[in-house]
Every structure is written in C-alpha cells, then in structure tokens.
Amino acid sequence: MQWLDPKTGHRTLFNIGISRPAHEVETVEKFLRLPIAGETRFILVARDTSFAGKVKAILKGTDPAGAILRRIEIKLITDFMNT
C-alpha cells in the first residue's frame, strides 16, 4: 500500500509482512534497488514481535553494517490499531 502526502508530495510505502520473514527481507531488498527508493519511506508492518525480530535477524546477517535497517522502519500491526 502506498500513501502520498498531499501537502508535501512525499510517499510512504507500507508492506504488510505476513508471509515468511525471509520473503519479506527479499521484498525490502528489491524495493531498495528501485530508483524511487531514495525518495520513498518504507515501512514493513509485521504481524507480531516474533516476526519482526526474525526479519531484523535476517537483515543483520545479510547486512552487518545495518544500512538496510537504517533505511526502513519495522512496525507492528498493533501500532496501527485503535485501542
């Protein structure tokens, strides 16, 4: 899902992570290779903390310097729910 701020024109891409953590890492890596990635905020919405932790662990293994984790945000689906 993409959101475009009508005032600033900035884009945010929301990727809902519900498959396998390794697949979501592949999705993030593919997105970051696109030209639009430099101008678009990327938020991976994880289903729970365990899933988010697995994604982070894979990213740390493939990118020990942490460049990818600095370019994306990982949030939980509960962060978007009204309580």
Image (cartoon, rainbow, N blue to C red):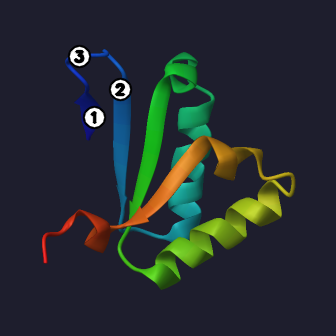
Is 54 on the left-hand or right-hand side of 61?
A: left
Task: Tell me how many marks there are.
Answer: 3
Q: Residue at x 59, y 68 (%)?
A: 55
Disc 2 marks which amino acid?
A: Arg
Q: Are marks 2 and 1 in contact (CB under 8 Å)?
A: yes
Which residue occupies the extreme right position in the image? 65
Q: In the image, which disc is placed on residue 7? A: 3
Is 4 on the left-hand or right-hand side of 39?
A: left
Of the residues tagged 2 and 1, which is closer to the observer? 2
Q: Marks 2 and 3, how far apart in space?
A: 11 Å
**Is residue 73 positioned above or below 33 on the image?**
below
Q: Nearer the viewer, residue 74 or 5?
A: 5
**Is residue 57 positioned above or below 7 on the image?**
below
Q: Are marks 2 and 3 in contact (CB under 8 Å)?
A: no
Which residue occupies the extreme bottom position in the image? 50
Q: Nearer the viewer, residue 35 or 76?
A: 76
Q: Marks 3 and 1, how far apart in space?
A: 15 Å
Q: Residue at x 42, y 63 (%)?
A: 75
| Residue 45 location, quadrant | bottom left
| Residue 83 location, quadrant | bottom left
Disc 3, SS: loop
Q: Dot 1 corresponds to which residue? A: 2
Disc 1, SS: strand
Give the mark, 2 or 1, whose residue is nearer the N terminus: 1
